[in-house]
Image (spheres, rainbow, N blue to C red):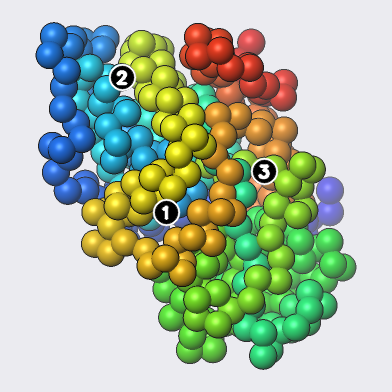
Amino acid sequence: MPATTSTLLRRGAALIAALPLLTLAACGYGSKAADDSANTKVAAGAEKIDGLDSVKIGYFGNLTHATALVGRQKGFFQKELGATQAAYQVFNAGPSEIEALNSGSIDIGWIGPSPAINGYTKSGGKNLRIIGGSASGGVKLVVDPEKIRSLKDIKGKRIATPQLGNTQDVAFLNWVAGQGWKVDAESGKGDVSVVRTDNKVTPDAFESGSVDGAWVPEPTASKLVAEGGKVLLDESALWPDKKFVITNIVVSQKFLKQHPKAAEAVLRASVETNRWINAHPGPAKAAANKQLGIDSGKALPADVLDPAWKSIRITDDPLAATLDTEARHAVKAGLLENPKLAGIYDLTPLNKVLAAAGESSVSDAGLGVK
């Protein structure tokens, strides 16, 4: 490998390694949402799981974490945990959630593939396992139609992604490379200017004209469309069968080893929640939006909620083969050394739950524990 390339990879890896600390300095581990007394009622005679007083669950306040939103709002997690309290923290970014998992501030979390990969590889494969899937899709390239009319017009423009090295940032850099354009991964400078912008800020940046478009997850993509943006590309179109992982369920290896029944209970709740979501899309959408409103103080309007919800596919399958592909994209972009992902998955508990529910098993694509 040429020295310049090796240096870039090391610098990119070091920058990603620093992200958790930067994020923690900015916003801490996350926020505890409002009282859950209406949907955390414990059934009479219920017992604690594994003797635990609580299981601490983390997730993001966005629609690609619909399983966690709906499972919390409808009480599915509390039902399966019995007299063990389902406690929650809401996060704004993957690195802060990984740090919380490492510290024990949460036990289980819903998270995107890039922070899961980074968290696993940085610890030498010792801190987490992916134990289930949650969602596919829900990522779009939205542009200002007055400035960008076709994909070739992206060259020379300013395009926002949520964070250096995050899942959408890697996907956009990979797409740019596929067009034959060059961008320095760290600085974002090149044939396209990649502007790392928090999803909460992106709509304002788009409206002010400081960015010409954004490669972002839902509901940010639909917020931009509501402001006059146009969907130029749905990322699902770039994947086989239009499926790619956007949200996984991760657990600390320590918690999984010491409290397997609790982890299995959360997985049962996840499978039950996903089945309910897919059978009742209207009520599920309303439940997710209600929890978003509780978590953020403001629910989504219909012109944002409806298109965003339609673009997300809820699934128990972690789509492991696509995670491996996303890791290779990060390596190609110069943001990650060649990762050793063997052992990142332990799908035995999930497949046990799926079998009991009469569902087909899912694959770890050869990346499971041996």
Answer with left or right where residue 50 lies relative to residue 288. left
Mark 2 → mark 1, Cα distance in angstroms: 23 Å
- The picture places residue 337, in percent across and down from the top left corner, at 68, 44
Residue found at x 31% / y 19% = 80
Above/below status of 129 relative to 191: above
Which amino acid does the dot numbered 3 rest on?
Phe
Which amino acid does the dot numbered 1 rest on?
Asn
The residue identified by callout 3 is: 244
Above/below status of 76 relative to 25: above
Answer with left or right where residue 350 lies relative to residue 79. right
- The picture places residue 58, in percent across and down from the top left corner, at 34, 39
Which amino acid does the dot numbered 2 rest on?
Glu
Name the front one of labels 2 and 3.
2
The residue identified by callout 1 is: 62
Question: Is the Cβ of the residue at disc 2 closer than 8 Å to that at disc 3?
Answer: no
- Which badge, 3 or 1, is on the more N-terminal residue? 1
- Which badge, 2 or 1, is on the more N-terminal residue? 1
Helix, strand or loop status at disc 3: loop
In this orientation, which residue lies closer to the viewer: 53 or 359?
359
Q: Can residue 187 be seen in this view?
A: no
